[in-house]
Image (cartoon, rainbow, N blue to C red):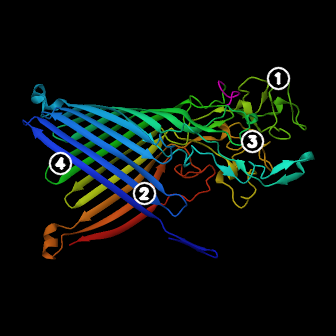
């Protein structure tokens, strides 16, 4: 229900989900195992807004296994979404997989004591995405009660007359359709010594087609208030994953378990509509990862030898001009003229570093049990993650942050310390636009390794607990986020901030006991 009274508003939503499924599973002649599933689902969701949500579709799966050695599977989804125009609401997304359990072959029997499991698998399929930039019914135009960013229609000399009116907002996309991801995977599963050591390796290749994006090549003179959208973006994502588990009982009282995971993934924009002035230049985003950082390449800090007139900030003729600030001074950042046009401006921005999104994610840990004692440790880390520092981290850029300075504020260029190896360039009493531009000077590698969890415990002997009528008592000392190892020292590198203005991740140490009845 919805009730609105004065400034008070109550709302209530509801969701109805229906699912019907049919399953089949049978083995013929002890060697042919067949299973199948067919499912229909429908979801109606009303969050109290004017238009409810609806999705429905069919899904199916059939698999065949011969003699426990050869596996084949086929899946499909036939999904419908209200986000598309009638006649284009449904998409068919098939997938298939095959597997070969080599360890079950007769020729592998002599090696079974060593190789307890060996399996090769491969899969290929499609997945559809109907949540396109969070916009519903993009196949319809929208009408706004304001004219773009101007707020009103204007006419007359110097636009002295204006009135509020209706105007087209978002342009309709009549051929709007599903975004499709083509996924391919190759995998290996290896088990050694009856499960003591398990290893899995995967290589994946994902290609997203029909990504819903705005067109940048259409000039404003075409008459659109906003640049139109379309299904034309393409992105590839390739990488590998590995997981390792080791379990070993040593003697009667000692048990050791070790695990590790590693993931590497690199994505690349292979097709994106960009302005003609950008295509083929250092500013083009095509060919780079999603969220690639762009900025200027910092060469060094200016010295007095770079100037004809230091007082008026006039550079020597052979040095490219850069006019971000009213006057340059020794100690300001000197940027590279990337496009070699004799000046440094917005056309010299280029890809620097990588993205904030890490390309490498890994973790490893161990568990040890000896009689009543247990010990566990877990490390987590990321690699190839970059961030450009900005905002209040640069003194003078944000005057609202005036109370405190970072401890390295003294590590800066001064007349008395004209070093190139400093954290801060020349400081100013106001906003130094030249030194606050996004550039490699402020680029930092945010890779880290964190001691995520550490725990030590002791369980009282079971014979004592049985006499007391309990199943067990365990005492523990536990710590979380205790240590972080990183070259970046200003703040926790896992925080999603460019200036450190965020709540830090909590470090905790606790002790207690657990009683089981």
Q: Which residue is mark 2?
A: 44
Does residue 511 lie above or below 29 as drawn? below
> What SS does tag 2 mark?
strand
Specify start and end residues of the magenta stretch as a single range. 275-280
User: Looking at the image, how many numbered discs can be counted on the residues?
Assistant: 4
Q: Which residue corresponds to the image point at 42% horizontal and 45% vertical from the top-left?
A: 80
Q: Which residue is mark 1?
A: 318
Q: Which residue is mark 3?
A: 435
> What SS does tag 4 mark?
strand
Could you give the CA–CA distance between mark 2 and mark 4, rounded to whole angstroms?
A: 52 Å
Q: Earlier in the sequence, mark 2 or mark 1?
A: 2
Between tags 2 and 1, which lies in front?
2
Looking at the image, residue 223 sits to the left or right of residue 190; the answer is right
Q: Which residue corresponds to the image point at 33% horizontal and 35% vertical from the top-left?
A: 95
Residue 239 in the image, given as x and y percentages of width and height: 42, 33
Q: Quadrant of residue 515?
A: bottom left
Looking at the image, residue 383 sits to the left or right of residue 183; the answer is right
**Residue found farthest to the left:** 29
Could you give the CA–CA distance between mark 3 and mark 4, rounded to whole angstroms?
A: 60 Å
Between tags 3 and 4, which lies in front?
3
Residue 471 in the image, given as x and y percentages of width and height: 18, 70
Q: Predominant secondary structure in magenta?
A: loop
Residue 193 in the image, given as x and y percentages of width and height: 16, 38
Q: Which residue is mark 4?
A: 249
């Amino acid at each position: 229900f919805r009730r609105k009274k004065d400034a008070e508003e109550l709302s209530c939503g509801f969701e109805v989900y229906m699912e019907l499924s049919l399953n089949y599973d049978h083995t013929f002649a002890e060697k042919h195992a067949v299973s199948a599933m067919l499912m229909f689902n429908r979801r109606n969701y009303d969050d109290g807004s004017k238009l409810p949500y609806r999705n429905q579709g069919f899904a199916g799966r059939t698999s065949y296994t011969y003699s426990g050695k050869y596996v084949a599977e086929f899946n499909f989804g036939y999904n419908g979404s209200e986000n598309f125009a009638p006649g284009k609401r449904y998409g068919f997304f098939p997938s298939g997989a095959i597997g070969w359990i080599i360890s079950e072959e007769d020729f592998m029997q002599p090696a079974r004591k060593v190789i307890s499991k060996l399996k090769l698998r491969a899969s290929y399929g499609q997945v559809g995405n109907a949540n396109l930039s969070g916009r519903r019914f993009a196949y319809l135009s929208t009408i706004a009660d304001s004219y773009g960013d101007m707020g009103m229609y204007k006419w007359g000399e110097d636009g002295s007359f204006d009135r509020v009116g209706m105007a087209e907002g978002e342009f309709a996309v009549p051929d709007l359709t599903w975004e499709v991801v083509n996924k391919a995977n190759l995998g290996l599963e290896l088990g050694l010594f009856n499960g003591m050591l398990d290893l899995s390796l995967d290589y994946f290749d994902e290609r997203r087609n029909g990504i819903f994006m705005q067109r940048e090549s259409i000039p404003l003179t075409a008459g659109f208030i906003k640049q139109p959208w379309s299904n034309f973006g393409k992105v590839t994502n390739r990488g590998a994953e590995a997981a390792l588990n080791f379990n070993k009982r040593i003697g009667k009282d000692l048990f050791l378990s070790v695990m590790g995971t590693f993931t590497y993934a690199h994505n690349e924009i292979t097709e994106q509509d960009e302005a003609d002035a950008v295509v083929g230049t250092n500013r083009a985003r095509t060919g780079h990862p999603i969220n690639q950082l762009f900025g200027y390449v910092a060469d060094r800090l200016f010295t007095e030898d770079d100037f004809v007139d230091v007082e008026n900030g006039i550079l020597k003729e052979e040095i490219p001009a850069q006019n971000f600030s009213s006057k340059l001074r020794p100690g300001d950042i000197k940027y590279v003229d990337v496009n070699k046009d004799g000046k440094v401006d917005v056309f010299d921005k280029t890809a620097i570093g990588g993205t904030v999104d890490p390309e490498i994610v890994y973790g490893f840990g161990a568990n040890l049990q000896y009689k009543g004692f247990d010990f566990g440790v877990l490390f987590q880390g990321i690699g190839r993650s970059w961030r450009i520092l900005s905002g209040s981290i640069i003194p003078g850029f944000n005057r609202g942050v005036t109370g405190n300075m970072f401890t390295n504020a003294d590590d800066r260029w001064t007349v008395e310390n004209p070093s190139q190896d400093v954290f801060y360039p020349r400081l100013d009493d106001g906003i130094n636009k030249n030194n606050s531009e996004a550039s490699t000077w402020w680029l930092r590698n945010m890779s880290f390794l964190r001691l995520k969890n550490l725990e030590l415990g002791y369980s009282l002997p079971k014979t004592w607990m049985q006499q007391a009528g309990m199943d067990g008592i365990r005492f523990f000392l536990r710590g979380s986020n205790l240590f972080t190892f990183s070259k970046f020292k200003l703040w926790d590198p896992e925080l999603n901030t460019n200036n450190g203005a965020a709540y830090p991740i909590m470090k905790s140490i606790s002790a207690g006991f657990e009683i089981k009845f």
